Amino acid sequence: MIKYYYKSLRSQQVQELGEYKRGCWVYVEAPSPEEVEQIITKFKLDPGHIEDALDEDEMPRLEKEGDQSYIFVRYAYKNAEAELVTVPLLFIFSDDIVMTISLVHLPCLEKFLKGKVEFATTQRAKLVLQLLHEIVEQYDAYINSTSKQIKLIRSRLRGHEISNQDFIDFVVIEDELNEFLAALMPTNATLRRLLRGRYIPLFAEDQDIIEDLLLNNEQSIEACNSNIKSIVNIREAYSSISSNNLNRTMKRLTVVTVMVVLPSMFFGLYGMNVDLPFQHEAWAFTAVVSFSFLFTLLIFSLARRRRYF
C-alpha cells in the first residue's frame, strides 16, 4: 500500500493525495513486489536498502547513498496474538522526499492523521524526528505496562500465591524486554549519528529533540535492564523459598516417620512368639505403651526445639 499525505504549516487537516507532490509524506505499508518496483523506479531508490526494510529481522542503522539517507529503526506493536514484538521501519530522506516503509501498520499513524500531533510534511527533518519521538514513547508505554505486571506478580510472591502461569508470564515478559533491548541499543547509536547533522539537516530545535530522544531512549534501556533484574531476582527468591519449604517438609516427614516407626518396633518385639523379659507380668503391656508414648514425646520435643515443626 502506498499513500501520499500532505500538510503544510497553514493547513488544519492532513490531505491524502492521489499522486506524489513535492513536500508530501510517502507512506508505504506492506508493499507488494509491484509497488516496491514502482517506488524504486519513481524515486530512484537503492533496491538493496528497500529489500532490507522488508526483512523483519533488520536492525537499526544509518546508510547514505548520494543525497538519500536511509534510517533504519524498529518499533514495537502488538500482533494478532496480542504479543509484543518489534518490526523494522525505514525512513528515506532526501532534498525532495520523506518516505517511510514498514511491514505492518504504523501504530502512531492515526495520531498524525487525526491531528493529535502538530506537524507539517513540508518540514521533512522535523517530521522524521516526530515519528521517532512517537516510537520512543510507544516503547515507554509498553515498558511501564510491563513494570506494573512484574510488580503485581511480586506482590503475589509475598503471599505465596504465585503460580506456574506467573513463571510462564515471566518467560514471555523477559523475551519481550530482551527484544526491546535489541532494538533500543542500536537505536541509541543511530540517534547519536543523526545528531552530527550529516544525514538530515538539523536546526537548533531539531538537535534539542534528538537529545531528548537520546535521553528517553537511554531511560527505556535502563528500565528494561531493571525489569529483567527484577524478574531474575523474583525467580531466584521463589526458588530459594521453594527449596527451604521442601527441606522443612522433608525434616517434618522424617521426624513423623521416626515417631511412628519406633513405637511400632517395640510393639512388634512384644508380639513375637519367643521368650521376652517381663512377658508374664501384668504391668508389661502398660509399661511398653507408656515407654513408647514417652519416647515419642521426647522425639517430638527435640523436633520442636530444632524448629522442625
Image: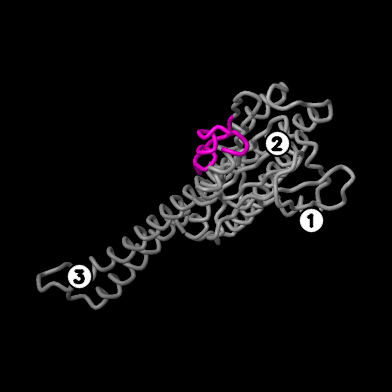
Magenta span covers which residues?
41-61
Quarter of the image where one finds residue 261:
bottom left
Indicate the secondary structure of the residue bearing disc 3.
helix
**Upstream in sequence: badge 1 or badge 3:** 1
Placement of 219 over or under 235, stated as above or below = above
The one of 110 and 120 positioned closer to us in this rendering: 120
Per the image, is 42 magenta?
Answer: yes
The one of 198 and 282 positioned closer to us in this rendering: 198
Placement of 178 over or under 150, stated as above or below = above
Residue 97 - label: 2
x, y percent for residue 78: 59, 55
Residue type marked 1: Lys
Q: Nearer the viewer, mark 1 or mark 3?
A: 1
Placement of 37 over or under 297, stated as above or below = above
Indicate the secondary structure of the residue bearing disc 1.
loop
Alpha carbon separation for disc pair 3 and 2: 97 Å
Label 3 sits on residue: 268
**Which residue is located at x 74 percent, y 51 percent?**
17
Residue type marked 3: Gly
x, y percent for residue 179: 54, 42
Left or right: 53 as drawn, with respect to 138? left
